[in-house]
Image: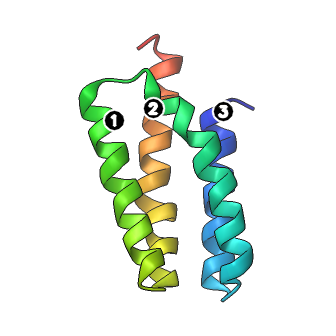
Amino acid sequence: MNAPTHITDNARQCARLFRLGRDIEGALAMVELLDAAMPQFTARSVEEQARWMQVLSAILQCQERQDWLGVADWLEVEFVQMCQGLGAQESHGK
């Protein structure tokens, strides 16, 4: 399993935890998820890094407001799409 697939699977699982009201477990899983995802974006284009920061900021803002469904939505939709785009670029040789 390549890194983007592993990360997207973990993002979906993390989102499920937030949707089930298991915010403490979700927050712990999210820290691991973001730590694993961060290196995927360091060598990317400025546009991709800016998008990463936008999504990350939105997730953290939702977390700060304790908007767990918002966190889940950002993880499950925007974050997953962004990571899937990384996998597609790698399989096509960038």
Picture quarter containing residue 19? bottom right
Binning the other alpha carbons within 10 Å of mark 1 as few (below 14), some (14 to 19) or many (20 upward) gives: some
Specify which label sits upstream in the sequence, 3 or 1: 3
Q: Which residue is mark 1?
A: 49
Determine whether the residue tagged by mark 1 lies in a helix, strand or loop.
helix
Q: Which residue is mark 3?
A: 3
- Checking the image for residue 70, the label placed there is none
Q: Is residue 85 above or below residue 93?
A: below
- Name which residue type carries label 1: Gln
Q: Are marks 1 and 2 in contact (CB under 8 Å)?
A: yes
Residue that appears at 61% across and 57% down: 11
Q: Are marks 3 and 1 in contact (CB under 8 Å)?
A: no
Give percent across and percent down for residue 45: 30, 23
Specify which label sits upstream in the sequence, 2 or 3: 3
Binning the other alpha carbons within 10 Å of mark 2 as few (below 14), some (14 to 19) or many (20 upward) gives: some
Determine whether the residue tagged by mark 2 lies in a helix, strand or loop.
helix
